[in-house]
Image (cartoon, grey):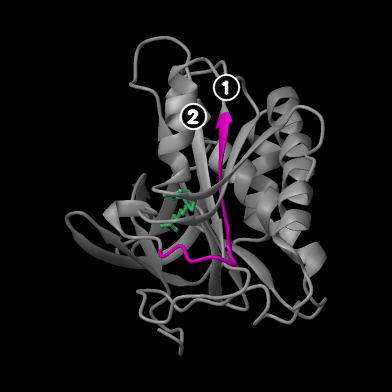
Amino acid sequence: MALPGGFNLIELGSVGSTNDEAKSLAATGAPDGTVVRAASQTAGRGRNGRTWVSEKGNLYFSLLVRPACTAQIAVQLSFVTSIALAQTLSGNLPVTTAVTCKWPNDVLVDDKKIAGMLLESAPLGKGPLDWLVIGIGVNIASYPCDVMYPATSVHAAGAPNIAADELLAAFCRRFAKWRTIWIDDGFVPVRDEWLARAAGLGGEIGVHLASGSITGIFDGLDEQGTLIVLREDGERTKITAGDVFFPTASNQ
Ligand code: BTN
């Protein structure tokens, strides 16, 4: 299969983790836009040390970018990625499905997780980040049942004929478009687009943190993409890392 200009596809069979493959390639000078895709993974990783079950039939890939900015700014690419992924899925699923973004970087379809991403970067120094690997898993044919957050797949969501190849190529086109907007116009249009699709904005959310859980109203994102939670006492708490849940949802 072919990807749009600016992307260079490496297709593999079974690997440990496409993120590890992409990180090795980054260390040996692979260019921005390298995409490592695998049919399956034996050691797929999710966020916070979780396992990402990676059987054949779903989409597993890692995109290597060389962002020419600091790590703090490069994190905004996770929102660029989420938008690109959400728009790609939205364009391929029945019009009645709701495709939303869940902070920090999940995509939901009708409130169920269909895709997630894991960002890993070069060791942090003072200057621009040497590389960032954006690892993405999209449930196409199957989805896990015994997970913390309810899941679904492209097929289960009503698009049984969509091929992973098509989705990957469409994702790359949208990613390139939104990355250009981000470079030219900054984070504001990206944040606006992400918030327009944000799951639970203005409603009650909970966040599992390393130190425990908090609840409050999902009040938006700051200029870095940090989550803002309005607490019962009127304080606004800013969160850079955690797992969001929706306390009133019936499916959790
Ligand atoms: C999450 O939601 O917890 C993130 C899941 C990220 C999974 C993808 S699959 C391709 C890439 N390789 C990995 O080992 N993980 C990411």
Residue at the top extreme? 127
User: Taking 141 as reference, is 193 left or right?
Assistant: right
Separation of marks 2 and 1 at Cα, in angstroms = 7 Å
Which residues are drawn in magenta?
53-64
Would you identify the image quadrant in which residue 108 lies? Answer: bottom right
Q: Please say whether residue 60 is one of the residues in the magenta stretch.
A: yes
Toward the viewer: 212 or 166?
166
Would you identify the image quadrant in which residue 153 lies? Answer: bottom right
Residue at the front extreme? 13
Tell me the SS state at disc 1.
loop
Q: Is residue 224 visible?
A: no
Tag shown at residue 81: none
Q: How dense is the environment of label 2, judged by Cα within 10 Å: few (below 14), some, or many (20 and up)?
A: many
Residue in the picture at 49% in, 25% down: 25
Q: Please say whether residue 125 is one of the residues in the magenta stretch.
A: no
- Which of disc 1 and disc 2 is earlier in sequence? 1
Residue in the picture at 46% in, 87% down: 251
Q: How dense is the environment of label 1, judged by Cα within 10 Å: few (below 14), some, or many (20 and up)?
A: some
Would you identify the image quadrant in which residue 85 lies? Answer: bottom right
Task: Give the residue type that dot 2 points to.
Answer: Leu
Q: Position of residue 87 (x, y in %)?
A: 74, 57
User: Taking 63 as reference, is 91 left or right?
Assistant: right
Q: Position of residue 65 (x, y in %)?
A: 58, 27
Disc 1: residue Cβ within 8 A of ligand 1's nearest atom: no
Toward the viewer: 197 or 8?
8
Task: Give the residue type that dot 1 points to.
Answer: Pro
Residue that carries the numbered disc 2 in the rendered image:
132
| Disc 2 to disc 1: CB gap under 8 Å | yes
Q: Position of residue 237 (x, y in %)?
A: 34, 51
Toward the viewer: 2 or 70?
2
Residue that carries the numbered disc 1 in the rendered image:
67
User: Taking 70 as reference, is 83 left or right?
Assistant: right
